[in-house]
Amino acid sequence: MKIVLPGNPKSTNGIYKTTCRNGYATLYMTNEGKALKEAYQWEAKTRWKRPLFDGEIEIRVRLYFKTNRKHDIDNYNKLWMDALNGIVYKDDNQIKKLTIEKFKDKENPRIEISLG
């Protein structure tokens, strides 16, 4: 089964920020990050019509970017993994194997997630 999340993949560097209060650093998700996570959740809910995975799963991810700009693929997974919690699997800690590839598609940037 495959889920396609439309749009240029977003790095966690752009959706999480840190603030300092009373000498303590706090990490929080930006409004843009919250909106994107919610959009991913709605997209997944419309495509996933099966029961939640129960047990270990393997996932193959294909990141399609608009440009050939340098992208560190390890920065593009936290948001969509969390967004699929409770929709596709109970928790992303069930992921036993994660394979990630990156490509360029100027006309149709997206994230393709194949589950098995």
Image (cartoon, rainbow, N blue to C red):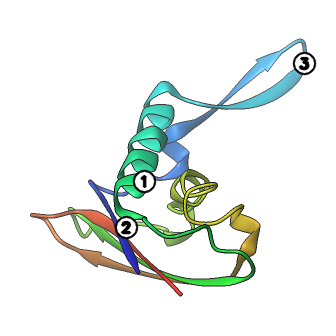
Q: Amino acid at mark 2?
A: Lys
Residue 45 tag number: 1
State the residue at coordinates (37%, 67%): 70
Q: Amino acid at mark 1?
A: Lys
Q: Distance from label 1 to label 3 (Cα)?
A: 40 Å
Q: Distance from label 3 to label 2 (Cα)?
A: 34 Å
Query: Where residue 74 appears, x then y in whole percent?
Result: 57, 69
Q: Distance from label 1 to label 2 (Cα)?
A: 31 Å
Q: As displayed, is residue 2 above or below residue 67?
A: below
- Which residue matches tag 3? 23
Q: Are marks 3 and 2 in contact (CB under 8 Å)?
A: no
Badge 2, how many Cα within 10 Å: few under 14, some, many 20+? few
Depth order, front residue of 22/58:
58
State the residue at coordinates (25%, 70%): 68
Q: State which mark lies toward you, 1 or 3.
A: 1
User: Which of disc 3 and disc 1 is earlier in sequence?
Assistant: 3
State the residue at coordinates (37%, 57%): 9
Query: Where residue 39 appears, x then y in whole percent?
Result: 38, 42
Label 2 residue SS: loop
Query: Where residue 87 appears, x then y in whole percent?
Result: 55, 57
Quarter of the view holding residue 62: bottom left
Label 1 residue SS: helix
Q: Residue furthest top?
A: 22
Depth order, front residue of 38/32:
38
Q: State which mark lies toward you, 1 or 2.
A: 1
- Which residue matches tag 2? 70
State the residue at coordinates (51%, 57%): 80
